[in-house]
Amino acid sequence: MTSLGSASSQTTPATAADLGAQIGLVARGDTAAFDAVYEQIASSVYGIVWRVIRDPAQSEEVTQDVLLEIWRDASKFDPERGSAMAWVMTRAHRRAVDRAWILTGVEPYFGATDGCGWSDTAYAKWLADLLVSQLLAPGR
């Protein structure tokens, strides 16, 4: 496995299909397939987590949690419902939002949704409140 910063974040159609196949193998406990999944997604997961949390140590911890979750829940991936990268990145973003909520104490808003748990307006309001709280944080 490489460090988080060195894995490529470029996904081509061929590697996207390969990622789905690799996650299928991970679901059967294939550690070599997990290594391949890690190489393909680690830097992208870290990137989206960092963009939400903006703290390197917390971002690394959440990234580890997400990768562990991918290992544990690989059998839940359904290629009929979307791409493997979308499945991974959705999990990463949700974990990052959860951690940001814990770190800042700014509660996310929930309202009418599009099926993913957030309305566009509710998410935008929550994100704006989060960013304002970070800007007004002591020592900033």
Image (tube, rainbow, N blue to C red):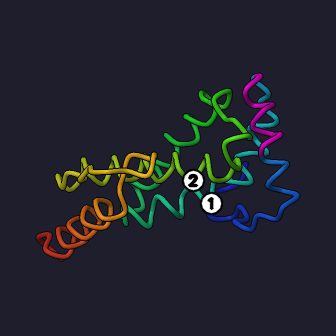
* Relative image position of residue 44 (x, y in whole percent): 61, 61
Pointer 1 local density, CA inside 10 Å: few below 14, some 14–19, many at least 20 = many
Type of amino acid at the residue the image marks with label 1 = Ser
Mark nearer the N terminus (2 vs 1): 1
Please tell me which residue lies in front, 137 or 16: 16
Q: Position of residue 42 (x, y in %)?
A: 63, 53
Q: Is residue 69 above or below residue 16?
A: above
Q: What range is drawn magenta here?
A: 20-28
Please name the residue that numbered disc 2 is placed on: 89
Classify mark 1: helix, strand or loop.
Answer: helix
Q: Residue furthest right?
A: 14
Pointer 2: residues within 10 angstroms few (<14), some, or many (20+)? some
The residue lying at 36 percent from left, 52 percent from top is 118
Q: Which residue is mark 1?
A: 43
| Quarter location, residue 72 | top right
Any mark on residue 9, and which?
A: none
Position of residue 9 measured from the top left corner of the image (x, y, whole percent): 69, 65
Q: Nearer the viewer, mark 2 or mark 1?
A: 2
Q: Is residue 40 left or right of residue 99?
A: right
Describe the element under mark 2 as helix, strand or loop.
Answer: helix
In the image, is residue 34 part of the stretch drawn in magenta? no
Asked if marks 2 and 1 touch (Cβ < 8 Å), the reply is no
Residue 111, image x, y percentages: 27, 51
Residue 74 horizontal side relative to residue 22, left or right = left
Name the amino acid, label 2: Met
Relative to 49, say whether 136 is above or below: below
- The dominant secondary structure in magenta is helix
Task: Please give the name of the residue rendered at 71% of the width and 61% of the height, measured from the top-left corner.
Answer: 7
Q: Quadrant of the C terminus?
A: bottom left
